Image (cartoon, rainbow, N blue to C red):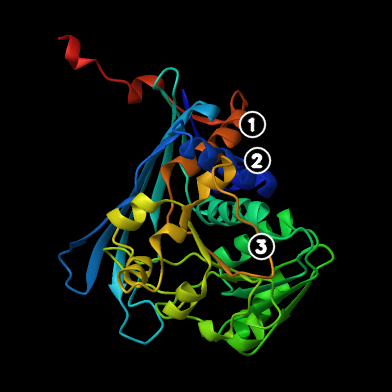
Amino acid sequence: MAIIITDEDVKKNLSMRECIEAMRVAFRDYALGKAKTLPRARYRSETPDPSREYFANVHIGAVPSYGMACVRAGSQLLLKTGDTPGRKILSNFDPVNWTVIILYDLATAEPLAFIHESYLSGFRVGATTGAAMDSIARDEVEVLGVFGTGRQARANCEAICCVRPSIKRVKVFSPNAEHRATFVNNVTLENVEVIPVETPKEVVKDSEIICCATNTTQPVFDGNLLEKGQVVISIANSDVTAKRHEVDETTFAQADAIIVNDWQSVETNQQTELLSPISKQLVDKNSVYELGNLFAGKVKLSQNDDRIIYYKNNTGLGMQFAAAGAIIYEKMKGNKTNREIPRDWLASEDYSQS
């Protein structure tokens, strides 16, 4: 029987370090042709209310190393909120995002679990960043600059500090001073000073890693502020449903190497923030690498004083949910307190045999 896994179950049964390792394995196996995943599918549709739009977001993937496949499906209503520069033009209407992850056993094809997908979404994004930085960043990094104060910013900050315990100071910026203060109060990292700063320039200056995790549609800092030796991370991305640019074209042009989660997603989802600099010849496509190739040993990139590296955490992939979900499921299966869905509710006849 399939079990139901809640947000609280995810928090109790998946540590950041475990999730980072799961992301590393998934992306490595993808680069080696073992794991399977496809670019996420997103679309919008009209609704009976012209002020609202329906939005769907679907991921699928499989990671044989964990014996698991998954489908992650999200559904929500969006409400137009205006055209304020640098802000989302659409926001959740309710605000509710109806999202579920279904885990399937690769050995039997049977559904094993239904996961409430809220906490895990931001957590695996942060863990993917953590895995990337574990491969790229200097061992002795001490200063991290963060743009953003929400769930994604917290998860990315935690993951980076997890793989680089040498970090002593985190500088955080948001246009909203109250949000900055809340972030400082809520983020507790051992032996790390978390301080709010009042300008983007203060975040960039002297930061060895700069992480952008915001909901903006406009660049959060001037790329001319960057110095050799810095690593830049951003998670917001554009596609056919939304145009978002956390970094400017100057940042792209200055980057000596660019890393993305998945190049196929860049093309399929029309991620213009990368495609546009390439078309303008600001970026050489040969300097763009896929994350999994670093983990598989096909590409070697590391932070040094002679170059700027830009990591674009450009898309979510189904294999991430399969890998992380497998760890949670293994810890929970067989628990007497599990809520279960009867097997016959989900099974159907094989009509190909009729």
Q: Which tag, 3 or 1, sits closer to the chain's start?
A: 3
Q: What is the x, y in percent for residue 304? A: 68, 65
Q: Residue at x 43, y 32 (%)?
A: 69
Pointers 1 and 2 in contact (CB under 8 A)? yes
Crowdedness of circle 3 by 10 Å Cα count: few (<14), some, many (20+)? Answer: many
Give percent across and percent down for residue 353. 18, 9
Q: CA distance from mark 2 to mark 3?
A: 33 Å
Q: The residue under label 1 is which amino acid type? A: Lys
Query: Label 3 amino acid?
Result: Gln
Name which residue lies at 62% across and 27% down: 335
Q: Amino acid at mark 2?
A: Asn
Task: Look at mark 3 in the image and give the residue it sits on.
Answer: 303
Q: In the figure, residue 308 lies in which quadrant? A: bottom right
Which residue does the image show at 72% across and 55% down from the upper left? 162
Question: Where does label 1 land, which residue?
Answer: 331
Q: In the displayed structure, would residue 55 be above or below residue 185?
A: above
The kind of secondary structure element at disc 2 is: helix
**Where does label 2 land, which residue?**
13
